[in-house]
Structure formats: C-alpha cells, structure tokens
Image (cartoon, rainbow, N blue to C red):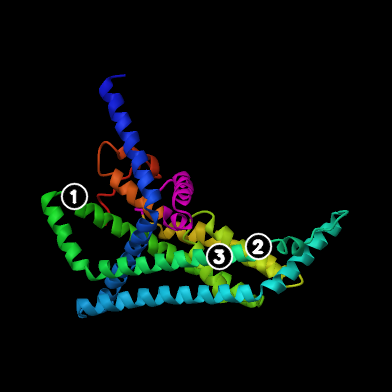
Amino acid sequence: MPTSRLLTIAQVLTGTAAALALLYFLRNIIIPLVIAFVLVVIVDALVQSIQRRWPGAPGWVVSGLAGVLVILGTSAGLFILSRGAVQLVQQGPALLVRLDGLVADVGRSLHLARPFHIEAIVAKIDWKQVGGFLLAGVQGVGGTVILIVIYFCFMLFGRKRIGEKHDAMASASPGDRSPNRVLQLIAANFRTYLWIQTITGAMITAAAAAVMIAVHLDNVLFWAVIFFLLTFIPNIGVTVGSIAPALFALLQFPSAWQAIAIFVVIQAAAFVVGNIIYPRMQAETQNIDPLATIFALSFWTLLWGISGAFLAVPLTLALMMIFAQFDSTRWVAAILSNDGKPDFRKSA
C-alpha cells in the first residue's frame, strides 16, 4: 500500500478519534446546544405555520408567539414530570409493600425454601448516598436546562443575524454544496422528522392515555408525558413506554388485567400507527436504513446517554446530509441511507 494512502487512513482515524473524544468530553456543552437548535427548528416550523394562516402578521409578533408557545409547552412538560415524580416518591412505601407481596407470591409458587423479600434489601440501602446522587443529578439537569435556555434565547433573537451570515456563506460558496444550503437542508429535514414524530407520537400517546384513564391508573398525565417523549426514541421507545406504566399498574392494582390492558392497547396502537399511518407520512428525506437507525441509537446513547437516544435520528440525518455533499464521503451517506441514494440536494 502506498505511503500516501497509509498517511491518509491514519489522518482519518486520528481525526475521527479526536472528534469522538471532543463529543464525549464536551457533551455537557454540546448537548444543550443541539437541543436548543432543535427547539429553534420547532419555533421556525411554528413561524411558517402561523404565517401561512396569518399572512399579514408582523414577523416579530409571529416569532415571539412561536417562541412563547415552545417555552410554555416545554415548561408545562417539565412541571408535569416534576409533579409526577413527587407523587411517585410519595407512593413509594405503598408500592414497595405491593412489590414485596408480588415477589413473595412468586417465591411461594416456585416453592422456594426461603422466601425473597424486597424490604430486606431496601433496608440495607444507604439512602443518604442515594439522595446525594439524586440531588447531584437534579442539579446537573438544572444546569443543563439553564444552558439550553441561554442557547435558545441567543439563537432565537439572533435568527436574522444568523440568516445574514448564511447568505454571506452562500455567496462565498455558491451551489448545492454551500454551507447555507446544507444548513437549510438539515433544518428542513429536522422539521419533517419532528413533525412526523410529533403527530404519530401524539396518536399513540392518546391511545395510551385513554386506556390508562379507563383503568384508573394513577399519575396519568405524568405517564402520558413520559410516553410521548419516549416515542422520539426509535425502535425501543414505545416498548419501554408500554412496559413502565404496565408495571406500575401491576403494583397499583390487586389484579393483573389492568397492566395487561395497558400493554396490549399501546402495542396495538403502535402497530397500527407504525405500519399504516407512519409509512404514509414518512417523507423521502428520512431515508435512513433501519439497521443504521439501531446502530445510531446505540452509538449516540453510549456517547451521550439518554440525551443521545432522543437525538440519535436527527443527528444521523444531519451527518448523512453532510456526508452526501462530498464525493469522498458519499459512500458513508449511501450506507446510512435506506435505498443507497442519499441525494438531498432536491429536498427542502
């Protein structure tokens, strides 16, 4: 193999390793930035939707209204999550007794000589250490939220200035491969992805909320918000979202039919939406191979944790669009694409 070829491979491997290291060690800064960008994309989609229905409205009014709607929606979701978490903690002792009873029943059915008791294990837990860990986690989440808000405000109020910079980049690099064009493609495909995931996720969440209300499960709003967020995690989100409330229904009720009903209804709704509605709504811009989606989910979750799981598909879409713009990396985009033809220059 020629020395120049070896040198090129070494440079690529070194650059990739350095990029991954930066993504990992700077994740506390980069993740809020990416989330803020996604929120700005949502605002931009709302702005376009409002302008189509209210064409004579001033631009600053529409932008402000869209920003307020996104902030209120996010704040309401965080409020419901925090209230639900508090209620779960308050119900902890009763749930623990119920769980201990279920475990004891299983032990008796298996004819175990020494019944297994959850309370004996819980008594050995250092709750001060657990509390400190949870407090550190809450503080970390609070810092992340503050950073997201700061990024979001600067991006939102600087949209005009950023647009002018994009135009300058486009004039410096005219054509389909200009940075402005690539950013437009990424934003357009983000909007499409978020729109489809929001609509289909809301459909499945409505079915989940209906069955949870029907069986009188506690904290329905909390579970509905959790489930809706989990629908944005590809492949496993809906499954996890159906198991969690079913398990708590098993703890809450003396019989098992409520848990079975929750799991079955959610899975049936997910099957109908995933196999009938979602394929009809899915745009050509979401041309990602299913195997690549699973790999992306595993990769970004390993790199960024739960935040990476939520951002896996948007980030993979962005990378695929960037790779598709250059001849040297189009083969990577082709591997990530579903049909092997990652041509995004016709999109947006």
- Which one is earlier in the sequence, the residue at label 3 or at label 1? 3
Frontmost residue, 193 versus 173? 173
The percent position of residue 279, horizontal first and vertical second, equals 45, 56
Could you tell me if residue 194 is visible in this image? yes
User: What numbered label is drawn on residue 332?
Assistant: none
Alpha carbons under labels 2 and 1: distance apart: 57 Å
**Kind of residue at disc 1:** Ser
Callout 3: 10 Å neighbours few (<14), some, many (20+)?
A: few
> What residue is pinned by disc 2?
126
> What residue is pinned by disc 1?
178
Q: Is residue 136 above or below residue 253?
A: above
The percent position of residue 246, horizontal first and vertical second, equals 65, 66
- Which one is earlier in the sequence, the residue at label 2 or at label 1? 2
Snapshot quadrant of residue 21: top left
- Which one is earlier in the sequence, the residue at label 3 or at label 2? 2
Snapshot quadrant of residue 332: top left
Query: Image point 29% across, 55% down: which residue?
Result: 186
Q: Residue furthest top?
A: 1
The answer to if 291 sits in the magenta stretch is yes
In screen coordinates, is 72 left or right of 48? right
Q: Is residue 186 above or below residue 41?
A: above
Frontmost residue, 152 versus 63? 152
Snapshot quadrant of residue 331: top left
> What residue is pinned by disc 3?
132
Q: Secondary structure at mark 3?
A: helix
In screen coordinates, is 213 left or right of 235? right
Task: Give the magenta part as a residue range.
Answer: 284-312
Q: Secondary structure at mark 2?
A: loop
The percent position of residue 12, horizontal first and vertical second, equals 31, 34
Q: Secondary structure at mark 1?
A: loop
Callout 2: 10 Å neighbours few (<14), some, many (20+)?
A: few
